[in-house]
Amino acid sequence: MKLFHTIASARRWRKNLRSKVVLVPTMGALHHGHESLIENARKIAGKKGAVLVSIFVNPTQFGPKEDFQAYPRPLSKDLATCKRGGADAVFLPSACEMYAADASVTVCESKLSPTLCGRSRAGHFDGVCTIVAKLFLVFQPTHAVFGEKDWQQLAIIRRMGRDLNFPVTIESFPTVRERDGLAASSRNAYLTPQERTLAPLIHAAMAKAADLKKPQAILKSCTAAIHKIPGARIDYIEAVDACTLAPLSNRKNPGRLAVAIFLGKARLIDNIPLPSIA
Ligand code: AMP
């Protein structure tokens, strides 16, 4: 498995590849959800193609009061995970390799970003779009792989790909969960043992609510159940159109039930499908 720290060395490697190049953008602190994404990337690439994982804690997608400094960076464990998942190369740039000190051009998505997580994380999705666009331009991947765990991010990247005509096929894969239903996340490490026992109640509340038919009833049920979790604070609980992220008023189109819940120091996000009902 090759390691690249500079754009120039990564570009030289890319230049010689003729088959599929599948990019898996991450911020590291890799868990079994990421490993499964890398394995899926390997399947897309096939024997002849190449899988490239990027590990970069992107400063521009963190707000001033967020956990950029504290974000875990277990590099040797991450490299072992990339290898196990079947990666051919890992891109590990520094912040100054990715951004000029006076960088002044960004990618801004304006319709899907202001809702859900964007309401409490101003500028977050501009940071995400900008770094993903840069990775697309550096590597010119044929495919890029994202997790449905970050549904809003996925919808925004699909929109960016469409609106800026990136010649990259965006593939997505369902959320990988712990046995008790909690969505695997690097931020689960912030939970105390007591909070960790409560955290699966979030997904349980969502799954139970999603059995109901009307969006309003789903929201009411989910909110009531999450209010009962000791110490849980609701950032948002929303039923949205899966594609436009607009509030869901009926079940004609596929939707998602999406939540962000604070539990102690952790802000946990999750979403599940609300299939259309004919
Ligand atoms: P991150 O490093 O958290 O930015 O995530 C990198 C990629 O892994 C993103 O496409 C995430 O959506 C995806 N991902 C994170 N957690 C999970 C999970 N539990 N299941 C599937 N994909 C995930």
Image (cartoon, grey):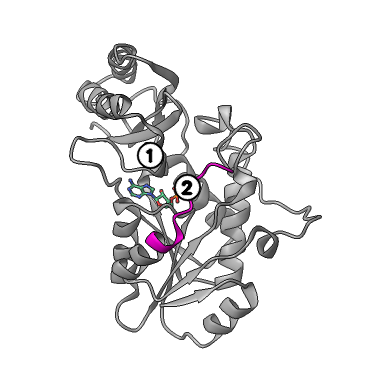
Residue under numbered circle 2: 72
Q: Which residue was labeled with disc 1?
A: 189
Which one is in front, 143 or 14?
14
x and y percentages locating residue 233 in the rendered image: 42, 17
Mark 1 closeness class: few <14, some 14–19, many ≥20 residues within 10 Å: some
* Residue at (56% x, 33% y) in the render: 118
Q: Position of residue 275 (x, y in %)?
A: 26, 35
What secondary structure predominates along the stretch shown in magenta? loop
Amino acid type, mark 1: Ala
Q: Mark 1 and mark 2 in contact? Answer it, CB < 8 Å.
A: yes
Name the quadrant of the N terminus: bottom left
Q: Secondary structure at mark 1?
A: helix
Answer with mark 1 or mark 2, whichever residue precedes in sequence.
Answer: 2
Query: Foreground residue, 42 or 140?
Result: 42
Magenta part of the chain: 69-77
Assign a secondary structure to mark 2: loop
In this rendering, the answer to whether 214 lies above or below 38 is above
Q: Residues within 10 Å of mark 2 (few under 14, many from 20)?
A: some
